[in-house]
Image (spheres, helix red, strand yellow):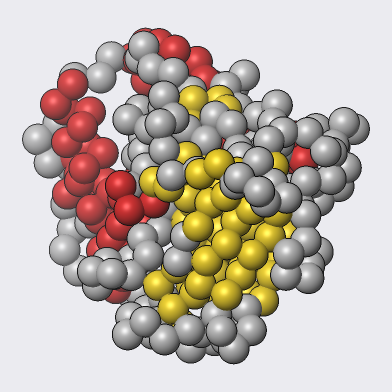
Amino acid sequence: MAYIDSFTEECSAEAVNARIDEAVEPRFREVMESLVRHLHDFVKEVELTQREWEVAIDFLTRAGHMSDDKRQEFILLSDTLGVSMLVDAIQHRRPSGATENTVFGPFHLDGAPEREMGANLSLDGKGESCLYAGRVLDLDGNPIEGVRIDVWSDNSDGFYDVQQPDEQPKWNNRGVFTTGADGRYWFAGIKPVPYPIPDDGPVGQMLSCLGRHAWRPAHMHFMLDHPQFERIVTHTFVSGDPYLTSDTVFGVKDSLILNYLENTGGDTQWKANFDFVMVPK
Ligand code: BEZ
Ligand code: FE
């Protein structure tokens, strides 16, 4: 076994990595060795001071204390540093024409009610109503039957139901729909509004110290599942939103920006049409 006895500034990473047991699973070894190398390179490049090290430890400690099953400060950290979108980009290199993914975010809930096509998701009656409609297609343009479409959005005050359990009806602006043979979906929701990500914790402090805002442009979340196709986790964004070019979590992609059109003569104020294209597994 390779053995480096002395820990010096020059060979610090090698000294740490030499301690990894030979029996360690190869992928875990690869990830940990690289993490240690990059972490040590970073400390050396900036010549991290003791005080800065203490600030970092305090930051991580506060992020940990703030996190539980309802609030995930580490995901917010990953999102605002662009890591969530980078992992997603690497994992979902899709052919042209396929719907692009974007960030999942912390506000999805498992177990949202299955709703009839055409149902209205807005249970608090607030906001500007919008008809969402389109098709789910394969790469050849054929409709896909049996796609489970899970949707969620903020309300017109910019909060998800989970953020205001005492104010919003449970499952407000959430629902699950399943496509029929024509691959079509349609439901009523609201035209979403921009909102700041939760910024009352260490990540919010970090953003403000960096001169960054915490806002996301208005968007509707979608997650599409089908046994034979790759899951899509995405949003549609409202064109013209002031935060499209500075989304605090880097989630905007041109192909996901949608014109919300006035729905003259319809039951809702707006309509938003979007076709999803899924890639076989
Ligand atoms: C969201 O879109 O719900 C979201 C994404 C990342 C961080 C916070 C919220
Ligand atoms: Fe969101």
Position of 27 relative to 193 (above/below): below
In the image as oriented, which residue stretches furthest toward the front? 265
- 65 or 245, nearer to the observer: 245
> Is 280 positioned to the left or the right of 29 in the image?
right
Position of 186 relative to 181 (above/below): above
Residue at (68% x, 36% y) in the render: 128
> Is 141 positioned to the left or the right of 134 in the image?
left
Q: Is residue 14 visible?
A: yes
Q: Quadrant of the C terminus?
A: bottom left
Residue at (84% x, 39% y) in the render: 124
Q: Is residue 8 visible?
A: no
* Residue 256: % across, % down: 39, 51
* Residue 229: % across, % down: 45, 82
* Residue 82: % across, % down: 34, 39
Q: Quadrant of residue 276?
A: bottom left
- 5 or 27, nearer to the observer: 27
Residue at (65% x, 29% y) in the render: 158
* Residue 191: % across, % down: 61, 40
> Is 193 positioned to the left or the right of 33 in the image?
right
Residue at (67% x, 76% y) in the render: 178
Q: Quadrant of the N terminus?
A: bottom left
- 26 or 18, nearer to the observer: 26
Mark count: 0
Position of 255 relative to 97 (above/below): above
